[in-house]
Image (cartoon, helix red, strand yellow):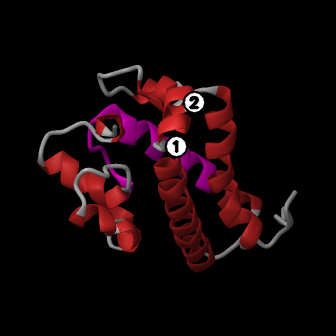
Amino acid sequence: MIGIRTSLPLPSLTEIIAQLIIYFIIEDYTNYWLHRAFHIKWVYENIHKVHHEYTAPTGFTTQHAHWLETLVFGIPGYLGPAIVPGHMITFLLWLFLRHTESVEIHSGLLFWSMYLILGKIRKINTVTRQLPQIKNSISSILYNKRNQQDTCHSLK
């Protein structure tokens, strides 16, 4: 399975953290650009609009999408482990953290939060701080939380 090892010894905490940071950077960067691409007029009207049917932020909206969007947005989550394979423990932890973050982002609430843990790292997409009309990266989610706005669902 994409070079992921399952044997002993288990990875060190340093190895796990380093790989998770890499996974989050790769996933955030690719998700940001894919999401922007899904707001191109034709793609939005024919595919991505389904995801924006809900106007109230809930964790369930993370999975409410056109089948093609679900397929395409699944790819970034596996790029990190494919590029930098680790141990199965790291991979399972990554999937848990990634899905928890996705539900949290769409819930409109700020919980334990990956933003607090990885907020400095995830400022790769700082362009959204200068362009508030583009609101779909982690840095803009922080901006939106301060302004009591919905995150992904304020995109048009």
Report the Cα–Cα distance between label 2 and label 1.
8 Å
Residue 89, image x, y percentages = 70, 58
Which residue lies at the image location 28% right of the left edge and 55% below the top edge?
Answer: 140
Instruction: Give the quarter of the figure containing the C terminus.
Output: top left
Where does the image place residue 37, in percent across and percent down from the top left?
Answer: 52, 50
Magenta stretch contains residue 97: yes
Residue 68 or residue 4, whichever sits in front:
68
Return the x and y of residue 24 as percentages of the image width and height.
52, 63
Q: Which residues are magenta?
A: 93-114
The prevailing secondary structure element of the residues shown in magenta is helix
Q: Is residue 18 visible?
A: yes
Numbered disc 1: secondary structure: loop
Which residue is denoted by mark 1 in the rendering?
Answer: 38
Decide if residue 22 is on the left or right side of residue 149.
Answer: right
N-term-proximal mark, 2 vs 1: 1
Residue 13 to residue 94: above or below = below
* Quadrant including the N terminus: bottom right
> Does the magenta portion include 119?
no
- Asked whether, in this view, residue 138 is left or right of residue 77, the answer is left
Q: Quadrant of residue 91?
A: bottom right
Question: Would residue 85 be visible to someone looking at this image?
Answer: no
- Residue at x 14% of width, y 40% of height: 148
Q: Position of residue 101 (x, y in %)?
A: 45, 46
Closest to the observer, 43 or 112: 43
Crowding near pointer 1: few (<14 within 10 Å), some, many (20+)? some
Seen in the picture, residue 102 relative to 114 is either above or below; the reply is above
Residue placed under numbered mark 2 in the picture? 47
At x 33%, y 34%, the residue is: 153
Residue 17's tag is: none
- Kindly check if marks 2 and 1 are in contact, taking CB atoms under 8 A apart as contact: yes
Q: Is residue 154 left or right of residue 94?
A: left
Residue drawn 44% across the image and 36% down it: 103
